[in-house]
Each structure stands twice: as structure tokens, then as C-alpha cells.
Amino acid sequence: MRRKLTRSGLTGLLVTHLADVRYLCGFTGSNAALAITRHCARLFTDGRYRAQAAEEVKAAEAEIVSRGAAVSAVEWLAAQHGVEAAGFDPSHATVADLDRWRNALPARLRRTFFAPLPAPLVEPLRVVKSDMELAILREAAQIGCNLFDHMLGFLRPGLREYEVAGELEHAARLAGAEGMSFETIVASGVRSALPHGRATDARLPRRGFLTLDFGIIHKGYCSDMTRTVHFGTPRPRERVAYEAVLEAQQAAVAAVAAGVRCGEVDEAARSVLRHAGLADAFSHSTGHGVGLEIHEPPRIGAGQKDRLEAGMVVTIEPGIYLPGEFGIRIEDMVAVTRTGGEILTPAPKALIEL
Amino acid sequence: MRRKLTRSGLTGLLVTHLADVRYLCGFTGSNAALAITRHCARLFTDGRYRAQAAEEVKAAEAEIVSRGAAVSAVEWLAAQHGVEAAGFDPSHATVADLDRWRNALPARLRRTFFAPLPAPLVEPLRVVKSDMELAILREAAQIGCNLFDHMLGFLRPGLREYEVAGELEHAARLAGAEGMSFETIVASGVRSALPHGRATDARLPRRGFLTLDFGIIHKGYCSDMTRTVHFGTPRPRERVAYEAVLEAQQAAVAAVAAGVRCGEVDEAARSVLRHAGLADAFSHSTGHGVGLEIHEPPRIGAGQKDRLEAGMVVTIEPGIYLPGEFGIRIEDMVAVTRTGGEILTPAPKALIEL
């Protein structure tokens, strides 16, 4: 990071986004700011985290402050020899934050000190995962698959969607998950046509689809997977649609490799659904990066020019949504390798009839 | 709100904080911006929410847009006759947001159009609850109490903290909660001395305290309560400390009434703990408002000059934390009335020995 700082021409950097703070120095507390110069780095947090900071923080000194962590970081940066300006991420600083930070500076520095970064500096480091991060993400994804397997033994018509979410989340806790990585999606029957159907008191149908989209947090990292199963025997039209989504998903997974443009991966899925006459029913992009946050770059969407790099972990999740009828989505986590993609979520994808 | 806008001298307002949007027009989707003029209001969201917006939105027109909701709201505001400037909440707009919004304006308006509000406009409306909101918060708090009662039958030494959190969250789902209002705190034994101890794999002790701090979401509103129970027979020092926290909590509840300064309520709790020699062990403030968000104004902290108003709902949650030994916190939700406070969380507070 410090090399990158130097190359960017900056003399200081203020990092307040907690996922970035954790990535750079290991600190997992809920209140922190990291100040970085070309020569050193210092983490600021409050008294609740004294023991935790001493234990977790690497590559930076930790300082416990009673005032705001970010304001303390600003004051420290401004007092460092050779620091004339500090970059910050404008996507993770509110207008009120910036105002507060400026007011913590000596008057002569107020107008010139803060430089909104034209592009994120930390995020590009985070999107390419280290071997240790890949190992954690593989574990997280496997916990998700085990949970899906558990749910196959639990699901039956007549259960309410929230009972399904409750069972899944309870099993996740018992499997040691630190939490869910996003609000569990349980969408059954006609509700499967909602891309983001939260669990309601609707009952699972005797006949129809059920979409489960969920993720857990494991050692700070997020998993994310979706499977759509069917209660009873699918109608021909439903079966054809499922096979089209599965083929689209597999085509996109097969398109993953270092050097490939994200838009090409999206197009691999989209063209299958276009040929199946379902282009309009695929109303979102194909996937996104995943790591310390559930949504990270890159975005796997139509026309995206960014290229995949080895070590990225992305979701591949095409879906179709036919309002008033049904919806289907299938999602894996895929690690990008030099020559292709490694599926981290090995749960079966062939249509399951319950 | 429009009256307030007129009084503030503004001709337009951009509301992007989702809790504010929900409060003002009822829309509960995850992507929205509300534009308000002195004469009308319009909600902007995306195609996923077409049906939901038509059903939920009151007192505003709803418009489905394919571009960003906030940018669309900005363009609409700038095109309204008589709107020369738009207020926005600088605590809920990032520096990058503001930049995007400005770029959506005609060049002649860019420098002057946006006015950061010197104080929030919507929040002061939200902190005083209507009768309907009070009824929902009462229900939410009661669901929390029922869950605590359920947990008393579940808790036993040897359980892991995450099993406790899992049971609680599962029971919450089955009780119809929409979710938890914050990460469940389960802190047992020496870990009870951590004010915000997340559930770990630590086992509940044969002898020692257990602090449960949790909340659910019901019809969009948050509950929040804490109880500390004891496994085995408490030592005299532990019993004395518990009684001191309970007395402090009751003193603060008794101090609640419309017109009282928040700092006086805090002082009611703090002085009890000071007399018990535990002033330093009470390391946080006494409480906070609660509603659509888990933390809302007012803050019930030392020296706070703001006065309580009838209809506010606040937590009263003094605690003590003795590192390496134990911790105790007791928390109720209290609705402020003209003459006092109504406890919304009637679960017992006398020391429970399990």
C-alpha cells in the first residue's frame, strides 16, 4: 500500500472504510481510522478495543483515542513531517465527515489538505485474493454448500418462508458462521419471480419453484450462493426455463479466466438466455466480486470492459423472472485462475424435485 | 414536512436516507430517493419495485427510473418551477454522491443548487412517535420480552454463546420478526465485561454472569433490550454490583419525563453508580432513541442539554464492566409521556439465578 501511495504522488492517506482498514492492518473493531504516510501507518480506535487492537493490528502502530478515530487520524497526519496532503475515498466519506475532518486541521491547511482519490487505492488490492484469503473463501463457500444440503432435508410444502430462513440461519450459527453476509432470500411459488424476495409468511407450494439465495460470514469473508429447487413435477415450460438458466450459468462459468473481459462473461450467460427467448426476463447483471464485503468489484455486467485477474473471486448468477409465473436463479462463487475458473460452491445444480 | 421546508426557507429537498424516505412516504424498498418541493413530492426507485411502490407510497407520486434514483430526483428537482436550491443531509450523502448529483445539473446551477442542511430536517419529526408508531414499538418490545422468556428455558451451562444467539434468532424468526435490529450480543463469564461481546464459541459457565443484548425488527421498527442473568449462586460482590446497576437503571427510568434534559436522566443512573464506587466501570452513555433505526436521537449521555419530549422512545441501559472479572447491563425501552415514562419491555429485572 505504501508503495502504491508513493506511486500515486500522495504523501498521506486516510482510510476509514472498515473493510479496507481490516484488509490493510487486520483490525476488526467497529470504530477505526487508519492513517498512512510513505513511511509509517497508525491505527486509531477507542478504549473498547484496547486489547483487541494490540492483538490484531499488524504493519501499523495502534493508538487508543477518546475523541473520534478519524479526526484523531487527521490531526496525526497533518502533524507528520512531509505530509502535505491526504487522499481519501469519496465513496466512503460523507459530506459531514469531510467537514469535520477539515475543521480538525490548522486553518492554513483546510482548503488544500484533502484530496478525493480519483479512483480507489485499496479496493484494487482487495479484489485479487491471496492464497490465505482464497482458502478462507473456499471454506466459507463449503459451509454454504453444507447448509444447502441440510436444507434439502428440511424443505417441504406448507412451511412458511420465514421458517425456512430461520432454519437456515440457525444451522449457519451452529456451523460456526459469524453471521449471514446479507438478508436471506427465500422466494417461493410466484414470489420466485422477485429477484430479491425476502422471506415472508407465504407457505411453500405443493407445486412450484423455491429460490434460496444466502451467504454466511466466515473469518470475516462472505459466501454467496443461490439454488432454485422445485416442489412436485415441473411443467415442461418450467423445465425448459430451468435448463436454459443452468446452461447460461455454466456458459458464464466456462467463460471465466484471467484476461477475459467481465462483459464477455456476462454475454456468455446472456446469449444463452437470448437464444432461449428469455433475454428480457434476465433483468440484472451476471455477477460481482465477493470477499470481505458481499459486493465488491469487479461487476460482471453487460459491456463491462474490466478484465478478470487470477485470484479474483466472483459470483456467476444469471436468473430469469416471469412476473405472476415463476423465477429461477442459479449462483456459484468462482475463483479466477490463469486458465479458467474454480467453482467454490460444489453443491449440485441439476434440477432438484422435492 | 413541506410546512417545515417552507419555514426553513428552502424551495427543495432531496431525501436519500432510506429510513427518512420510509418515514415520509411509506416506501420500504432498498433503492429510493425522495424529492420534495413546497408543493409536491416524488419518489424515485427502480423497476424491481414497481408493484411495491404503487402499493406503499403515500403523499408522493412514484416514478420508476432506469438510471440512479438520486440522480433522477436531482434532475426532477432542478426542473421544477420555483426550486432554486435543494437541501440535503450531509450525514447521509457521500462526497462522491454530491459530486454525481452536481454533475446531473445544468452547468449554471452546479455551484449554488445544493445546500447542506445545518441540522437534519426529517430526524426531528421521526424522534417523536405517533400513536401508531408507539403501538408498533410496544409490539416489537413485547416480542423481545417473549423471546427472553423463551431463552430462560433454553439457557444452561456448557452451551456455546453462538448456540444461544442461534436459538434466540431462530425463535425470533418463528415469532414473525423481520430480522434482528443489530448483531446479537451474548457475553458470558469474563466476556460479560465486554460491552459489545459478539457471540463466540465460548461456553456458558457453571458460575458467572451472562449478558443478552438483542433486538428484533417488527413492521420496520426496532426493539432493543438487555438482561444479565447469573448461573449458580452469585458472590456477594457480584450481587452488590447487580443491585447497583438495577438501582441505577430504575433511577434513570424514574427520571424520564417530557421536559427533562437527557443529561439529567444520564446523571440519575450515573450518580447511583458513583455512590456505589462504580463510576469508572460505567464506560458508556445511558441510552439512545430507537425507532425505524436502532440508534436515533436523542442521546441520553452525560451533559446532554436536549430535552425529552412526549412520544420519544429511548433505551435506558446503564452497565458496569470490570475487565477480567464480570460485567452487568440492564436495558429497557421507555416511551416518554407528559408525566413520566412507560416501560415497553416488562420482562423481570430482579437478578435471575439459573
Image (spheres, coloured by chain):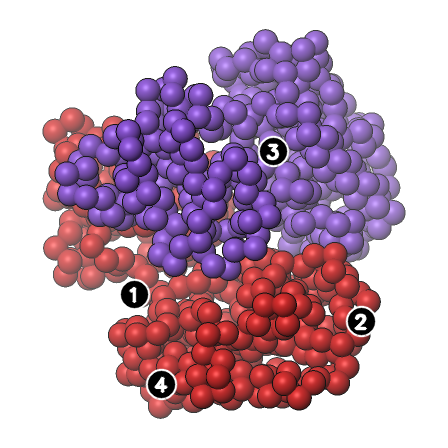
Chain colours: A red, B purple
Tag 1: residue type?
Pro
Report x, y in % for residue A68: 38, 33
Which disc is residue A157 wearing? 2
Report x, y in % for residue B347: 81, 32
Q: Quick check: marks 2 and 3 in contact, CB under 8 Å?
A: no
Tag 3: residue type?
Gly
Q: Quadrant of the N terminus of chain A?
A: bottom left
Which residue lies at the image location 40% right of the left edge and 24% below the top edge? B5
**Residues at marks 4 and 2 on the same chain:** yes
Give the foreground label among 4 and 2.
Answer: 2
Which of the two labelled residues, at mark 2 and mark 1, occupies the earlier sequence position?
Answer: 1
Q: Quadrant of the C terminus of chain A?
A: bottom right
**Residues at marks 3 and 4 on the same chain:** no
How far is disc 2 from disc 3 in space, using C-alphas? 36 Å
Which of the two labelled residues, at mark 4 and mark 2, occupies the earlier sequence position?
Answer: 2
* Circle 3 chain: B
Q: Is residue A347 visible?
A: yes
The quadrant where residue A192 appears: bottom right
Which residue lies at the image location 49% right of the left edge and 24% below the top edge? B124
Q: Which residue is mark 4?
A: A257
Q: Which residue is mark 1?
A: A124
